[in-house]
Amino acid sequence: MHYVSTRGGSGRRRFEEVLLAGLAEDGGLFVPEAWPRWTRADFEGLRGCDYPTTAAAVLRPFVADAFDPSELAELCRAAYANFAHAATAPLVQLAADDWLLELFHGPTLAFKDFALQILARMFESVLARRGGRLTIVAATSGDTGSAAIHAVAGRRQMAIVVLHPHGRISPVQRRQMTTVDAANVLNLAIEGTFDDCQALLKALFADADLRAELGLAAINSINWARIAAQAAYYVYAALRLGGLERPPIFAVPTGNFGDVYAGHVARHLGLPVRRLIVATNRNDILARFFTTGIYARGEVVPTRSPSMDIQVASNFERLLFELGGHDPGRVREWMRRFADSGHIRIDEAILRQLACLWAGGTADEAETLATMSAVYAQTGEIVDPHTAVGIAVGRRLRQPGEGPLVCLATAHPAKFPHAVREAIGREPPVPPRLAQMTERTERFEVLPAELPRLRERIRAFATGRG
Ligand SMILES: *Cc1c(COP(=O)(O)O)cnc(C)c1O
């Protein structure tokens, strides 16, 4: 198994390099050179298997010889051992043929734990073999930072620095990051906006000398290993709902297009999937694309589902690569046009072909709250606003008799108590993991949004000077 860049400038790479590099040097994203393809028997063999076994089987063709099968199995077992539900990713029934796939039982109560728990262990294993150190630097407006900190805390040969906009993230999200007590974790509250944090991060990574000196690494959602790890829960859920005979429709609350694209990866592997529904909040660049064939940037507006408040979906380039017939020249041309004019359009013929496999839709704030309230009234289940966007759009777009609808529950409702109170008039019960956090001391430093100060702070931290 080799990987190539969507922009054609990286040559053929092995999994280990793709894991550590994140983004390709030419600015493109890594994709498999050819898709592995499972037989029916491969899928049947996983019926009834537990989550870590399923995850190891799905990851195996993608990691190839980077980890031998027994090590991969061990990494997966350890990654999912501290999830708070014995099924890891349980299915909950909402209506006769509607299901919730709960992806929020990990340490930080959002689906990002599924990828980051395994990614950090893969990093640690590769470093143990090769030697050297990594300093992971991330900017966050919400769930990624906490999932990354919980995954990396206490691991050997690795440190993590997370930038968040000072005073601009929710108290729950801040506490999830700042109450982790480990010497290899540094939280920096930047005096500025999330965009300032991202600009600083970009500037750090643009400095090739600093990157080499400190072994800077990124773990954002374009990392191929994260996508591959997420493909596993699509396989796990489909096998539990009637297996290969009744292909499900998956409705996925979407921002950066990583999670729903992982469903597409499962489909490439051979999993029968009826359709993938891309559900967005008012930041609807992708919903508009799947209905009109036009990918056009818009203004970001804040919503109750902040992890989806994105108007440029980084992982979308992977789909463009396929739509352009695996021609990196076309991807470069599309990305250049998008950078220049803020929009691109695909051919009618390609759009028609997409409509068999994909659909896109938007739920506004009122519909999100109404869905939370309706689900609670009908079933007693409390869902978070991100999940509600998926349910609203999934129910609107599914056709009669189309098959089971599986809505991905991407965050635990207790992470968004205010929105839950607005929708159903009470706050959700607080799970023990979240309750314990409020008693712990917070650790973070406030820094101005200035590159030289930030660079020196990270250098001192990464070289063990405090
Ligand atoms: C990150 C996130 C999303 C969006 O996922 P993408 O992979 O960026 O499309 C949706 N819901 C929650 C709760 C998230 O944390």
Image (cartoon, rainbow, N blue to C red):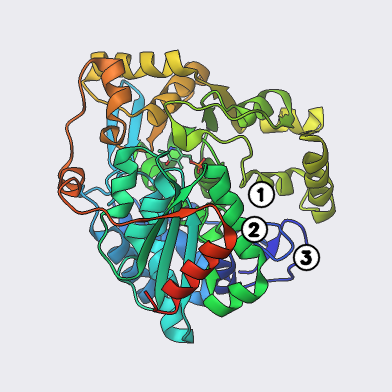
Q: To which residue does mark 1 refer?
A: 318
Image quarter of the C terminus: bottom left
* Residue at 37% in and 47% down: 236
Counting residues from the start of the chain, the first of labels 2 and 1 encountered is 2
Q: Are marks 2 and 1 in contact (CB under 8 Å)?
A: yes
Give coordinates of residue 99: x percent, y percent: 34, 29
Which residue is identified by label 2?
A: 31
Is the residue 111 above or below the residue 393 in the image?
Answer: below
Residue 36 visible, this angle = no
Kindly identify which numbered label has been placed on residue 9. Answer: 3
**Which of the pair 299/148 is nearer the observer?**
299
Q: Label 3 vs label 1: CA separation?
A: 15 Å
Local secondary structure at mark 1: helix
Q: Give how far across and how far down residue 324 sits, in percent.
A: 78, 45
CA distance for labels 2 and 1: 7 Å
139 to 376, vertically: above or below: below
Locate the N terminus by quadrant: bottom right
Q: Nearer the viewer, mark 3 or mark 1?
A: 3
Mark 3 or 1, nearer chain start: 3
